[in-house]
Image (cartoon, coloured by chain):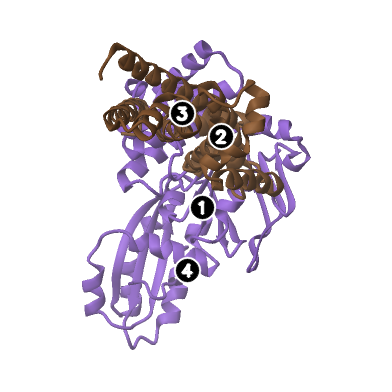
Chain colours: A purple, B brown
Amino acid sequence: MSEIVIEKLSKTYRSKDGTVEALKNVNLSIESGDIYGIIGMSGAGKSTLVRCMNFLERPTEGRVLIKGKSLGDFSKKGLRKQREEIGMIFQHFNLLMQKSVLENVCFPLYIQGKRKKEARKKAYELLKLVGLSDKEQAYPSQLSGGQKQRVAIARALASNPKILLCDEATSALDPQTTSSILELLKEINSQMGITIVIITHQMSVVREICSHVAIMKDGEVVEQGLVTEIFSHPKSAVAKELIRKDSAQEPMGRQTVQNIIQSGEQIRIVFSENSAFEPVIANLILTFHEPVNILKADTKNVGGVAKGEMILEFSKDSKNTEAMKRYLRERGLEIEEAVDYVD
Amino acid sequence: MWTDEVIQMLLNGVKETLYMTLVSTIIGYVIGLPMGVLLAVSDKDGLKPNAVLYKVLDFIANVVRSIPFLILLIIILPFTRAIVGRSYGSTATIVPLVIAAGPFIARMVESSLKEVDKGVIEAARSMGASDIRIVIKVLLVEARTSLITGATIATGTILGYSAMAGTIGGGGLGDIAIRYGYHRYQPEIMIVTVILLVVLVQVFQSAGMLAASKLDKRK
């Protein structure tokens, strides 16, 4: 049974200036043990979507099923009980600033009516898990962003949830801290078997840890599936744009390259697994007797699989462009237009 | 003129002023704290918006706060007499002080609670906390510094009001200042009472600020 099922979900906000459709007929199914990414630009409705998964926001239409049970059917009390099964972490950590780290982690346990001694024991264990056992008496204001998020993760895990919702959990962190937090989430997923839903606007986050992804735009899911699949051949314009931004983030001397090489068609190719054995590009050049510019080449870790990514540019007056693309496709490479590769 | 009698009278004035101020502040909070919580909770973006409740409380708070304290003192004299049995003296003054302080305190509490980060409230909600628990364990705790600062301001204001009540025989230092300084032309005594009032306010202010900063874990 799927851990989370979203059925025909819509959310409309009414205000004085009319209505805003934050979500339009969203359908998703998240399996137990997945790390599911939901990506989109800001305003795409992803934060609203994740808040519907624990009914912090009530959808206008449609259903949210957690382990087959519709959240809308629960009483107020039942819903609160159900929320204990769903941990959540936030972009700005949302810790209690007047309480110590230990008390922050104890907080959800007190809500459940656990005794102080029992709660503290559990909190110690969790702080150890997130690598902060020496900070139990500190206050949030004395911690770095990454440490605060670790406390928030420990707190979210305190009630032994089956699901962890992460709302832009790494967006306020620097790249290095982001990696370490993602590493921790991966550990939690594999060791505790917790299903993780990650809301983000960064493709790099999805690429690093997600198994599945849904891409959102203007309140709709425009594309969903395996990350490896979508990374190799993105169909929607949004997906392509997000992947392009991800590539563009790597610090390289792109600007200079751009200045030297003008025009000529550019394509982005993705190698997966075995295609790396054959010297494809060298053979391509030998076959067509025509130079090809490699604008960028990179390997990326996509959900644990090494994927090669390359941006090629054919020479300006080439008449063999189509034939060359066909040649590459025949060799098992994914190809797509890399329109406007350089910003 | 600094006879034992005068000194005794001044000490008694300090005692009465402290009595009126502290008792009124405490009872003021008994009324104002729940009222402030209800205002914060029932407002549009509060925990449980309730337009009717908010409007009613908002109206009461505004009406009471717009009546000048001296006028309030006089308007409610029959009510005071009914409760305390007489309309003069420090115990009788507590009645109008509480009525004036309650809504004032409610406003202070309301604004303190509204300062609490919405994200923290959302986090508590996501953990399955009920509204009541959020008020007690999140709002009141996170707003603690601001609440104590508010209490300090409230105490100072109530002390000022209690002195004003002296003009109609309310007891305390204000009463002494009016009777001796104004009616009997003894400005020295008036000045001494004013100095005593300044010292009292200073003590409350410093103690409040010290407590607020000691309890603030955000820095």
Q: Secondary structure at mark 3?
A: helix
B124 left or right, relative to A204 = right
Badge 4 crowding class, 10 Å Cα cut-off, few under 14, some 14 to 19, many 20 or more, is few
- List the residue tagged with mark 2: B102
Q: Are marks 4 and 3 in contact (CB under 8 Å)?
A: no
Amino acid tagged 1: Val
Distance of mark 4 from mark 3, alpha carbons? 47 Å
Q: Chain of mark 2?
A: B
Badge 2 and badge 3 in a common chain: no
> Which is nearer the eye, A36 or A19?
A19
Q: Is residue B126 above or below residue A322?
A: above
Distance of mark 4 from mark 1, alpha carbons? 20 Å
Q: Residue at x 59, y 24 (%)?
A: A111
Q: Quadrant of residue A311?
A: bottom left
Q: Quadrant of the N terminus of chain B?
A: top left
Q: Quadrant of the C terminus of chain B?
A: top left
- List the residue tagged with mark 4: A329
Q: Chain of mark 3?
A: A
Q: Are marks 2 and 1 in contact (CB under 8 Å)?
A: no
Amino acid tagged 3: Ala
Amino acid tagged 4: Arg
Badge 2 crowding class, 10 Å Cα cut-off, few under 14, some 14 to 19, many 20 or more, is many
Disc 2 versus disc 3: nearer the observer: 2
Distance of mark 3 from mark 1, alpha carbons? 27 Å
